[in-house]
Image (spheres, rainbow, N blue to C red):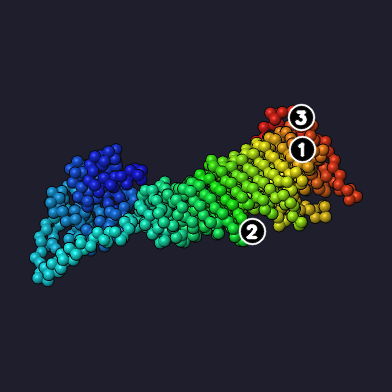
Amino acid sequence: MEQEKLRELFVAIKKDDVKSFSFLMTSNTDLNISFGRFPILSLLYLYGSYKILKSFEKSLMPIHNYKREEEPYEAYKKFKSKARKAVRLYQDEESFVYPAEMLAIVDNRFLIDKNYKNLYKNDEIALKIEKIYNLSGEYEISVNLQKITLKKKKLTFKQKLIGFGLVAVAVLFSLLGGLSVALVPSIVGRGTAKSPIKIGNEVELVTALAKGNRYYELENDIVLTTQVDSKDFSGVINGNGFKVVAGNNLSDGLIENLSGTITNLAVDIGAQNFKIDKNYGIIAKNSTGKIENCVISGNLSGTASLDEDINIGLFVATNSGEVKNCTSRVRVSLSNSGATNVYYSNFVCVNDGIVDGCTATVGEVVADTVDIAGIVCVNNGTISSCENYSSLSQTSAKEWHPNVGGIVCSNAGTITGSINHGELFAESTLAVKPEQGDMVVLVGGVACDNTGTISACQNDGTVSGASDISYIYAGGIAARNVYTEQKGAVVEECKATSNVLGKSLNSMVIAGGIVGETDSYIYANVYLVAISTIKNCGFVGEINTNAKTALAGGVVGFNYYSEVYGNYSAVSFVNSFVDGDVTSVQTKGTIISQTKEIIIGLERIVYNNHYVKTTDNAVSMNLLEVILGHQMLTPLSDEQAGATAYNTLDEIPEEVKA
C-alpha cells in the first residue's frame, strides 16, 4: 500500500471511521498490514475503534503473518502510556504486539472473555500475557491457550493512599493541560528513518532546523511569519512535496551548513529582496550533504555594495555535496555598486561536488555588474544532465569583465550531457578604455572559460556579447577553451544550433560556432606540453560580427596550437559593421578563422573536419604565421587544411553529425 494511503488508514483507525477504513481496504491482503509492531487488529483494540471492529473483527482474528510497514510514533506513545511497565517486553522493534496481548495491555476484560479463545496465540503469547498482568500487580492470573482467569487483588491501605494522591495529581494536571499543550510543539515520530518526526507548523520546522540531527517529515504546507535563524543541520528533512512559503523571511537561508539531506521540498520565496553582504543560498549557505528533488519559485532581488567577493547560489552558495533533480522557477534581478566580485547561478555558485539532473525553467536573470550562469557559476566538480531555459543578461558600466554562461561561467571540472536553451547576453557599456589592461566580455552557450572538460553538451540559445571598447569572446559552447597548469582543456561531442553575435566598435570580436578561442601550451614552438582539444563537435547557425576587427569561425574563432578534428559546421557569416567610411577587417573560416599551426613536428593537430560551402566562399581556415617578425595570414585549401566541403548539411555523413 502506498505511504499516503497508509497514513489515511492510520487516521481512519484512530477516528474509528469505518467508511474510510472500508474504502481503503481494497483487498483482503491489506488486512495483514502491521504498523511497525502493531497489527491492524491490535491498533483497533488500542484506540477502541468499535465501529470498525464490528465490521472487520472476525476477518482480522485469524491473521498472524503480517506485512510490516512504518510505525507511527503517535501509536507507540499511546501504547507506551497504556503498557506502563510492560513496555519493556516490547523493546525489540522487530517483534509484534499480537491482538491477544494488546487486549491485556489495555485491560479490556469484556473482549478478553469474549475473544480470547478465537484469537491467534501460542505458548510465547500466553507467557507474555501472564507477564503483562503480573507487572501490573493488580491481578492474580491463571492463563493457558484456552482461557485466562483473572482475580482482582485486594488493595492495602498504603496502595489506597497512593491511589488517592495520584487522583489528586491527575486533577491538577488536567487543569494545567491546556497550557502544557500550548507550550510544547506537537511533534510526533521518533526521529528515525522508519519513524521521522512530523512537522506541521512553523514552530516545529524551526525546532527541527535547530536540533539538526534527526529525521523529519512535513505533513502540510508551512508559512513562515518571522526570519529563520539558520543553523548547522546534519539530519534529514523530507518535504513530501509540501511547500515552505517563505515570503521575505529567508535573508540567511534555511541552513548555514548542511551535512545532512533536504529532499522533496518546495520553497516559495515570494518577492525576496535582500541586501547582498555575504554568501547566500535559499536552502544552505554551504553544503557537504545532499539536496534532492527540491523546487524554488518566486522572485529574488538584491544589491551589493561591499569590497569582498560574494557567492550567491539560489539553492546553495558553495557545494561539496550533491544537488540532484532540483528545479528553479525564479526571476532574478541583482546589482553590484561596490568594488567587489559578485557571482550568481540558479543552483550552486561554487561547486566542488556533484550537480545532476537540475533544470532552470522559464524565467530570467538580469544583472548589473554580477557574473551569472544558468546552473553553476564556478565549477570545480561534476555537472551532468542539467538544463537551463532561463534567459541570462548582464550589463556593466564599470571597469568589469562581464561573464554570462548558459551552464557555467568558468569550468575547471567536468560538464556532461547538459543543455542551454536560454538567450544569453553580456555587455560592457564602459565608454573609456582604462590606461592599463584590456577589457573583455565573455559569453558562452555552455561556459565562458573552460579549463576542464565539456562533453556531449548542447546549446540552442542565442549567444551575444557587446561593447564599444572591450574584446568580445563568444562561442556557441565556450567563449574560451584554455590550458591551465600544464593540462589542456577539452570540448568534445558538443552541438550548437544557434546564432553567435559579437559587437565591439573600437576593439575585436573573436567568435566561434563552438569555441571563440582555444589555447595550448607549447614549448619552443616544437613540443606540446598541455594541448587543448576541440573534437567531434558540430555547429549550425549564423555568426554575426559588428566590429572593426573580427575573427569568425564555424567551429573556432582563433586557434593557438590546439587539436581540432572530427568537427563540422553549416555556418553563415554576417558583418554588420557600419562606421562612416571605415571598413572592418573580418577573417572568416568555415572551420577556423585563424589557426597558429596545423602540424607540430610530424603530427597533424588540425584534420578530418567538415563544412557546408558558404555563399561568400569562405575558406575552411586561415593559417597565421610569423615570418621575419611580421604576421602573415594564408588561406588554406581543403587539402592543406584536412577539411572536406559539402553543398548541403544533409550531405555530411551521419557518423560525423552523430
The answer to which of 256 and 319 lies nearer the viewer is 256
**Left or right relative to 413: residue 126:** left
Amino acid under disc 1: Val
For the residue pair 291 and 563, the one nearer the viewer reads as 291
Classify 207 as above or below 296: below
Judged by depth in the image, the label closer to the viewer, 3 or 1, is 1
Amino acid bearing label 3:
Thr
Q: Which amino acid does label 2 sit on?
A: Ala
Q: Name the residue under label 1.
A: 578
Relative vertical location of residue 201 with respect to residue 547 in this rendering, above or below: below
Q: Which residue lies furthest to the bottom in this view?
A: 158
The part of the image, by quadrant, that contains residue 2 is top left
Residue bearing mark 2: 339
Residue located 22% across and 52% down the image: 46
Is residue 15 left or right of 535 when viewed as pictured?
left
Comes first in the chain, label 3 or label 1: 1
- Identify the mark nearer the N-term, 1 or 2: 2
Marking on residue 357? none
> Quarter of the image containing the N terminus?
top left
Residue linked to disc 3: 615
Residue 580 visible to the viewer: yes
- Disc 1 element: loop
Using the image as rendered, state which of residue 396 and residue 644 is in the foreground: 396
Of the residues tagged 3 and 2, which is closer to the observer? 2
- Residue 459 in picture, x, y percent from top left: 63, 40
